[in-house]
Amino acid sequence: MAKENEKKLVEAITSMDEDFAKWYTDIVKKAELADYSSVKGCMILRPYGYAIWENIQKDLDARFKETGHENVYMPLFIPESLLKKEAEHVEGFAPEVAWVTHGGSEPLAERLCVRPTSETLFCEHFSKIVQSYKDLPKLYNQWCSVVRWEKTTRPFLRTTEFLWQEGHTIHATAEEAMAETIQMLNIYAKHCEEVLAIPVIKGRKTDKEKFAGAQATFTIESLMHDGKALQTGTSHYFGDNFAKAFNIRYLDKNGQLQYVHQTSWGVTTRLIGAVIMVHGDNNGLKLPPKIAPIQVIIVPIAQHKEGVLEKANELKNRLSKVVRVKLDDSDKMPGWKFAEYEMKGVPLRLEVGPKDIEKNQVVLARRDTMEKIVVAMDNLEQEVLKLLDDIHANMLEMARRHRDERTYVATNLEEFKYIVENKPGFIKAMWCGDRACEDKIKEETGATSRCIPFDQETLSDKCVCCGKPAKHMVYWGRAY
């Protein structure tokens, strides 16, 4: 019976090789991360999914505060006139904006936009509170949700409303603002590698792909299991574009009026989608230990036998001092429990039964390798912590290997097209810097420029598209 239940559970997840999109949706639903709501493109974050977000948020928030940032909260609504102050910015967001036209049954004198991002609100506020160089820098961040009216949606990856953080800072000089922009990109990259076990490529977006209103956008890009790229986080340098539009000026040390220099940076609940698609397998989720809501699940074996539940509870109490632990003492069969927590991606399973108690040991099963290890009860805490660290390191290494094995080089357009169609992954190729070539590549292959990496290589001296002299090595790929 146990085997039957186990089989049924695992069969409920579509194989990733058969249909990756369906596999992804199955995991989101069956691992109880999120559910669909009655509004198209809006998702209900269930407790397990929200707990993952809380762990991501906790780590990032600590990193922001360590670097001097303070949390604030801005309104949900933006008056239309305010949104229109920075022309390029409003043009970039216009197609995705949701508008409020009535308050109760009364038409509003001015339409209100439901925030797609909060640059304009921060700018208006900064213009009121900054007078002198002594007021700078202002290092602000807010945790909130935003709304973008997307045509096609998928839980976590692209939804009409999503949770995120958005940092907004202003500085006296361009150098300080640029240093902040890069510092925040590095914080995101460290979070991805040290917490999510996701390796990233750091670089600059092309002008075509940069944020509306920014002078430069920097990005971290990661590769999903199906060979598609995902923009995992962005950091923007605004220069004084917004400062001029909103008249954010300060008196410098010489009593001269100067415009501030500004940055903006953010990551979203899309990170959860990245975790699913980088680490998951046909048994379900595979969570990196640092964000797993349950790091160790205790499954008692033959729990009806004398002393088993007592011992399981004792172990739970011991472990709860060092990890997030849960004991499943429900009357479901152990096989069902194994499959259930494998699907939920719990990094470690602890099995304890009458024979284990006799030998003063437990069995630990790793979710990443499915390996079982027998451990003495006396050293349990140390062994569990050591294993969790090892699981993180192994998951990061596996993801890095997967990315590197699926990173290809193309030196001409024919080669490029062949790789896109036959070998999904990142493509490294040289580019002349001309927008026409970038557009042509997208039109003919569906691949977009992901970033101009900080670590440049010279793969050839010619542009992959037009054959003219190349200026940059670029990562390309089809993306979410």
Image: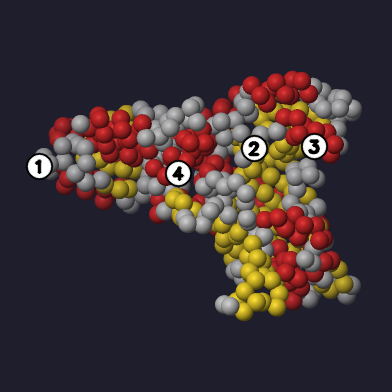
* Residue type beneath disc 3: Asp
Q: Nearer the viewer, residue 39 or 405?
A: 39
Rendered image: mark on residue 164? none
| Left or right position of 417 against 334 | right
Q: Are dots 2 and 1 in contact, CB under 8 Å?
A: no
Q: Position of residue 70 (x, y in %)?
A: 61, 65
Q: Position of residue 253 (x, y in %)?
A: 85, 71
C-alpha separation, residue under disc 1 versus residue under disc 4: 38 Å
* Residue type beneath disc 1: Glu
Q: Position of residue 212 (x, y in %)?
A: 76, 54
C-alpha separation, residue under disc 2 versus residue under disc 1: 55 Å
Residue found 51% across the figure and 33% down from its top: 20
Q: Nearer the viewer, residue 157 or 190?
A: 157
Q: Is residue 100 above or below residue 152?
A: below
C-alpha separation, residue under disc 1 versus residue under disc 3: 70 Å
Count every numbered label the image shows and give the total.
Answer: 4
Quarter of the image containing the C terminus? top right
Q: Which residue is mark 2?
A: 479
Q: Quadrant of residue 410?
A: top right
Pointer 1: residues within 10 angstroms few (<14), some, or many (20+)?
A: few
C-alpha separation, residue under disc 4 versus residue under disc 3: 34 Å
Which residue is situated farthest in the left direction here? 306
Q: Which residue is mark 1?
A: 306
The disc, 4 or 2, on the residue closer to the chain's N-terminal end is 4
Pointer 3: residues within 10 angstroms few (<14), some, or many (20+)?
A: some
The disc, 4 or 3, on the residue closer to the chain's N-terminal end is 4
The disc, 1 or 3, on the residue closer to the chain's N-terminal end is 1
Q: Which residue is mark 4?
A: 28
Rendered image: mark on residue 439? 3
